[in-house]
Amino acid sequence: MKILNKAHVPDKISVNHLEKIASKIFEVNRVTFSDDELPVEGTEHNRALYLTVKCEDFMVTRVLVDNGSSANIFPLSTLNKLKVDNDRIHRNNICVRGFDDGGKDSVGDIILELTIGPIEFTMEFQVLDVAVSYNLLLGRPWIHAAKAVPSKLHQMVKFEGDR
């Protein structure tokens, strides 16, 4: 409120423009998108959501946000490009399955620091030796950690007739 009280606001500003300015001030700890960032087809598009994130000391583009994935996935090729020491990978016996019922054994898991917008995350990833179209995949573990989707919604469903 202190910032809003001291901010210079032009006399001829539209309510919409003032709302945009105020919302930017309150978005300091949020990653959000505005209508300006929509593709030409607007909200009717069905494109995947890609972000650019900072991982350790590197900027990583083509980071896919996938609410259908129960794991955060870090391709081994991306890990090698970032020069992350493979000794940080903890070997495990996890098999990651895709929608086609195919499976891929994990090389292991790794804990990495991510910065997305103004927010820092410490996330666990399954490292897979696969050829994919993304550099990094953020699944439901990250989505819930970021509170992009309330976890409670995925834990229960209440129907009208339930008591």
Image: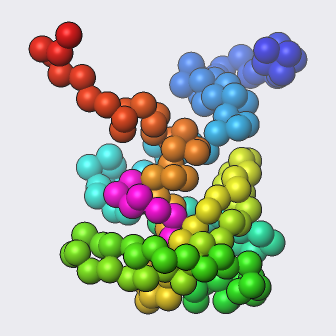
Spot occupied by residue 93 in the image (x, y as percentages of width and height): 49, 77
Question: Can you say which quadrant of the picture contains the C terminus?
Answer: top left
Q: Magenta span: helix, strand or loop, mainly?
A: loop
Q: Nearer the viewer, residue 30 or 33?
A: 30
Spot occupied by residue 39 in the image (x, y as percentages of width and height): 39, 57
Q: Is residue 39 visible?
A: no
Spot occupied by residue 23 in the image (x, y as percentages of width and height): 63, 28
Q: Residue at left 69%, top 53%?
A: 121
Q: Is residue 1 left or right of residue 44?
A: right
Residue lying furthest front in this view? 93
Residue lying furthest left in this view? 161
Q: Is residue 97 left or right of residue 150?
A: left
Q: Residue at left 51%, top 52%?
A: 141
**Which span of residues is magenta-colored?**
66-73
Spot occupied by residue 64 in the image (x, y as percentages of width and height): 47, 66
Q: Residue at left 39%, top 54%?
A: 67
> What's the colour scheme?
rainbow
Question: Can you say which quadrant of the picture contains the N terminus?
Answer: top right
Q: Is residue 5 left or right of residue 115?
A: right
